[in-house]
Amino acid sequence: MQATDELKKMDISFFAASVDPADANKKFAESLHAEYPILSDPDKKVAKAFGVLSPRGFANRWTFYVDKEGVVRHIDKQVKVQSHGKDVAAKAKELGFGKT
């Protein structure tokens, strides 16, 4: 089972965000056959607001866990690309997000 399948069963919203232009994100998502949206922040305003913009202008790979009230409950600043989907599902369960 893919991690996205587990997240879908939990009935939670999840997406990625990038400072790349929307057309680049669309191509990237299609190349991955991503089952989640990749939001685009080319002016980097959101990245700056969340504190993820590096001095070189790239967005750090951090994951924010936001509850239904809009409260950031956890920030994972140590994203491991190979296991990230499973890590997100495990942390979401730990935080009591969604239904299982």
Image (tube, rainbow, N blue to C red):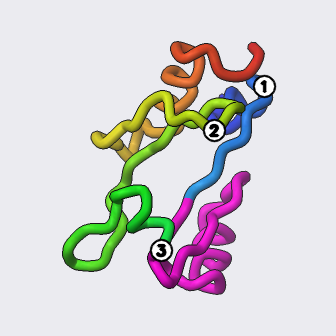
On the rendered image, what quadrant is the N terminus found in? top right
Residue ID at (35%, 59%)? 52
Residue ID at (34%, 58%)? 51
Label 1 neighbour load within 10 Å: few <14, some 14-19, many 20+: few
Whether residue 23 sits left or right of residue 61 in the image: it is: right
For marks 2 and 1, give the CA distance: 21 Å
Q: Position of residue 38 (x, y in %)?
A: 63, 64
- Are the two marked residues, 3 and 2, in contact with CB atoms closer than 8 angstroms? no
Q: Earlier in the sequence, mark 3 or mark 2?
A: 3
- Asked if residue 9 is positioned above or below residue 65 in the image, the reply reads above
Residue ID at (73%, 22%)? 98
Provide the residue designation for mark 1: 9
- Is residue 43 a member of the stretch shown in magenta? yes
Q: Earlier in the sequence, mark 2 or mark 1?
A: 1
Looking at the rendered structure, the kind of residue marked 1 is Lys
For marks 3 and 2, give the CA distance: 18 Å
Provide the residue designation for mark 2: 70
Label 2 neighbour load within 10 Å: few <14, some 14-19, many 20+: few
Provide the residue designation for mark 3: 45
Q: Tell me the mark number nearer the camera, choosing from 3 and 1.
A: 3
Q: Which residues are magenta?
A: 17-44
Q: Position of residue 57 (x, y in %)?
A: 29, 78
Residue ID at (45%, 76%)? 44
